[in-house]
Image: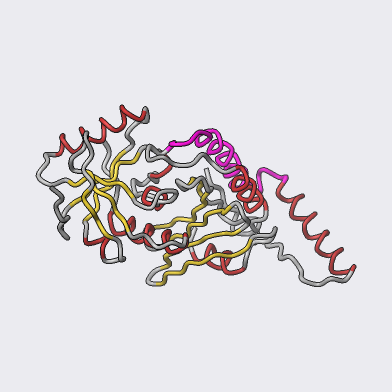
Amino acid sequence: MKQDVGEDEELARYIFSRRQIRANGSVKPEALMPSPHPDMSVTRHLSLPENAIWGIGEGISAERGLPLQGRLDLVSKNLTKYGLQVKTAPLPDNENHANVTSWPQDKPAQKQIALEVCAEAGNAKRP
Amino acid sequence: MLVALPPNIPAVEVVQTSGMSAVAQNLDDMLRGISKHLRDSVTLDAGLHSALLELEALKAECAAPNWDGYGANALDPESHMLAKSFLENLPLGIIAPSIAADPDGQVTVEWYKSSRSLVSISFDPVGILHYASIIGSRKANGSEPFIGSIPRVILDLTHKVPA
């Protein structure tokens, strides 16, 4: 059954491209840009322990053949305040999966939101 | 490594003239020739040289789709060409940006000092620059055509990100 994603829930965005993390550990907006898709994929922390959150990322990494570079933890309300929505979208291999939807159509507006969210989220965590 | 000009060498900016006369055209050609001559000196513009190398590395890294693990498009060759032209038209002495790609296959360049001082530009293959910035408490974003000379609004933003 679908659950609403709470405003204070933490969400993980796994990062598989080394270029999306700066040398100082902060994350570039490219890591959050949805295009060419309408949504951005995230994983809800819920009550998972740290090793289980990393485990999901490692699983995706193995499936896609790309090294896991890190993850950016986001708080749901720091997305929804920009007009985005976080919707549960469980997958067979990741029942905590959710989509960040309702991105603006124009690219500069998408970039601005991604810049703001990254600026507020702090640094990537490394596996 | 990004290298700035020594402080005693002022930044050189070539502004494309809008005049249509033969004199204006000659002046424009002469300024571009001077700019190219100066650029050919790696010691003067090592930062740009490094950025161009990074751009070529990006092309290889993002040549196939799904380079980000989320179904990204392969790097767009037209976007790559625009980015190269953009870098080659930057004012001499400016700190070179870092290079990356958006999931839609567009090249991006970024000037970054901190999370409150940065400018990001994407190169739309149709010849448009999409930019977004945070400079202190001010935010600016928009789109500008790129037809060989760098739009003033974008140059102004890059100058606001301290070295």
Residue B63 among magenta residues: yes
Range of magenta residues: B40-67
Viewer-nearest residue: B107 or A89: A89
Q: Quadrant of residue B129?
A: bottom right
Question: Which of the image's four quarters has the C terminus of chain A?
Answer: top left
Left or right: residue B5 compared with residue A80: right
Q: Position of residue B13 (x, y in %)?
A: 68, 62
Going by the picture, which residue comes out furthest to the right?
A: B22
Q: Position of residue B119 (x, y in %)?
A: 47, 60
Give the number of marks. 0
Q: Position of residue B123 (x, y in %)?
A: 56, 53
Q: Residue at x 15, y 56 (%)?
A: A4
Say above or below: B28 vs A98: below
Say above or below: A65 vs B88: above
Q: Residue at x 51, y 50 (%)?
A: B108
Left or right: residue A24 compared with residue B67: left
Q: Position of residue B135 (x, y in %)?
A: 43, 67
